[in-house]
Image (cartoon, grey):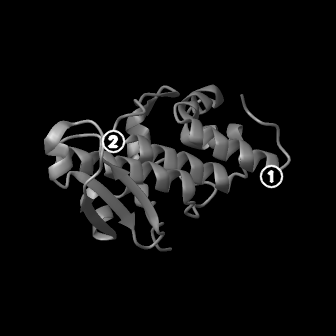
Amino acid sequence: MPAPSLHPAQLPVDRLLADCELQRTRRSGPGGQHRNKVETAVVITHVPTGTTAEASERRSQEENKAVAVFRLRMRLALDLRIPCPGNAAPSLLWQTRCRGGKISVNSEHSDFPALVAEALDLLHAQNYDLKATASILECTTSQLIKFLQQEPRAMLVVNAERERNGLHRLK
């Protein structure tokens, strides 16, 4: 049986960027003359999906690139579902972030989009049954909900799909 493909949000940055087009541009706003004279804004497009993300709030192009990559990974995690077996074991990354049933990750950490993608893909495979998904991910249902609540857009996705499946919305 072939190994399941990784979600683009789970790819290392260099592999993700290999599938992307990078555009550097200028943006208006605060930051003084440096910001208005130099192309510090970064727009990244994931070519296979057409998903884009950008950042222009920093004065450094490299800092803006890092922010844009994080935003792209988060958008991919939210918008793209990769089929996975319903009984898939949690990834090594998930296992390192979930110990004793408790998920430990900050929503600004670089691992966060990959973990969101994994949780949403597995929820999708389980028809958005939180209890079954939490059991597979080796965490409690309440921990899974708290994890998803760190990203309000993830909760919007989950609630829309739960309603579509005839399940009640989560708070």
Q: Earlier in the sequence, mark 1 or mark 2?
A: 2
From the viewer's perspective, is 124 left or right of 41?
Answer: right
Horizontal and vertical percent for residue 3? 45, 68
Q: Quadrant of the C terminus?
A: top right
Evaluate whether residue 142 shows in this view.
Answer: yes
Q: Secondary structure at mark 1?
A: helix
Horizontal and vertical percent for residue 152? 58, 35
Amino acid type at circle 2 is: Ser
Q: Which residue is mark 1?
A: 164
Q: Name which residue lies at 82% across and 42% down.
A: 167
**How far apart, in angstroms, are the residues tagged by discs 1 and 2?**
31 Å
**Of 37 and 102, the residue lying toward us:** 37
Q: Name which residue lies at 13% across and 43% down.
A: 34
**Of 104 and 107, the residue lying toward us:** 107
Q: Which residue is mark 2?
A: 110
Horizontal and vertical percent for residue 166? 86, 47
Mark count? 2
